[in-house]
């Protein structure tokens, strides 16, 4: 087993939309995974995951159980973001990463993986602001970091934006709107999961940012890996 296929990974948000699917993939690839859960939610973790009981908003509740993880993946966030949830973006999204970063530093984590959001964008300003501040916290920590910036992840229960595909195609073909269309493009949950696995198995040396085009490329690279 190579180092890339034998990592020890700590995941916050391990029972969420991305977290459960990512955990399944990592376990299947021979990684050791610890998932942070609230009391009573242990059954929601994929079989084989080591449950860590704690509160994502309070690092002291789980910090001592991160080690010996070499990789920390932060996936906590408000479900189905909307402009009406502006306060929750601060009290959940930002507060959770503010708790995670110092905990990861103290535990000696070597690589931090953070799912942010594409920006700038014409909508969801409060959500973007919280995630941008989260990125700043990770950067300031000095941790080697991979930041992924999807705009919308298509998948089960999240297919409606696919109707916008023709608009994206046209915008991508027009020079004046091409950059924005690429940055705010749609990615599938399969692409997102493959990009996350790529980020984990090919850790950054400094700060690496994967925008939508890079998420797609990373996912394609990983899909072709033997």
Image (cartoon, rainbow, N blue to C red):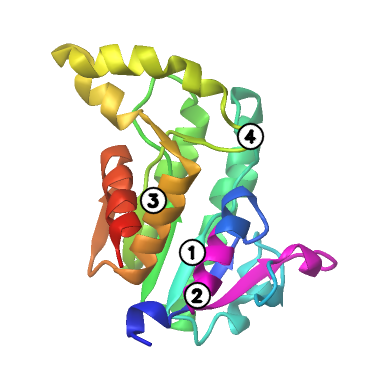
Which residue does the image show at 37% across and 35% down from the upper left? 118
**CA–CA distance between discs 4 and 1?**
20 Å
Which quarter shows the N terminus?
bottom left
**Sequence order check: which comes first, mark 3 or mark 1?**
1
Which residue does the image show at 65% across and 59% down from the upper left? 57
Q: Is residue 5 above or below residue 204?
A: below
Q: Provide residue 160's location: percent of width, then percent of height.
A: 57, 22
Confirm or deny contact between disc 1 and disc 2 (CB under 8 A): yes
Read off the residue under disc 3.
135
The magenta segment? 22-45
Q: Is residue 214 above or below residue 59?
A: above
**SS class, disc 2:** strand
Q: Which mark is residue 80?
A: 4
Q: Provide residue 193's location: percent of width, then percent of height.
A: 46, 53
Q: Provide residue 131's location: percent of width, then percent of height.
A: 45, 43
Which residue does the image show at 24% across and 19% down from the upper left? 172
Circle nearer the viewer, 3 or 1: 1
Q: Which mark is residue 73?
A: 1
Read off the residue under disc 2.
9
Circle nearer the viewer, 3 or 4: 4
């Amino acid at each position: 087993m190579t180092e890339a296929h034998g990592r020890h990974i700590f995941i916050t948000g391990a029972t969420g939309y991305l977290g459960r699917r990512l955990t399944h993939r990592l376990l299947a690839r021979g990684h050791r995974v610890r998932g942070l859960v609230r009391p009573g939610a242990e059954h929601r973790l994929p079989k084989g995951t080591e449950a860590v009981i704690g509160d994502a908003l309070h690092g002291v509740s789980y910090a001592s159980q991160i080690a010996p993880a070499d990789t920390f993946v932060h996936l906590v966030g408000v479900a189905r973001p909307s402009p009406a949830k502006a306060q929750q973006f601060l009290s959940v999204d930002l507060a959770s990463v503010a708790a995670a970063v110092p905990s990861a530093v103290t535990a000696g984590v070597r690589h931090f993986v953070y799912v942010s959001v594409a920006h700038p964008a014409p909508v969801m300003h409060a959500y973007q602001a919280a995630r941008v501040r989260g990125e700043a916290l990770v950067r300031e920590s000095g941790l080697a970091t991979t930041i992924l910036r999807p705009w919308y992840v298509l998948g089960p229960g999240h297919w409606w934006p696919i109707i916008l595909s023709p608009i994206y195609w046209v915008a991508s073909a027009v020079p004046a709107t091409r950059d924005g269309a690429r940055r705010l493009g749609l990615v599938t949950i399969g692409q997102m999961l493959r990009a996350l696995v790529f980020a984990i198995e090919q850790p950054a040396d400094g700060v690496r940012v994967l925008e939508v085009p890079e998420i797609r490329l990373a996912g394609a690279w990983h899909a072709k890996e033997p």
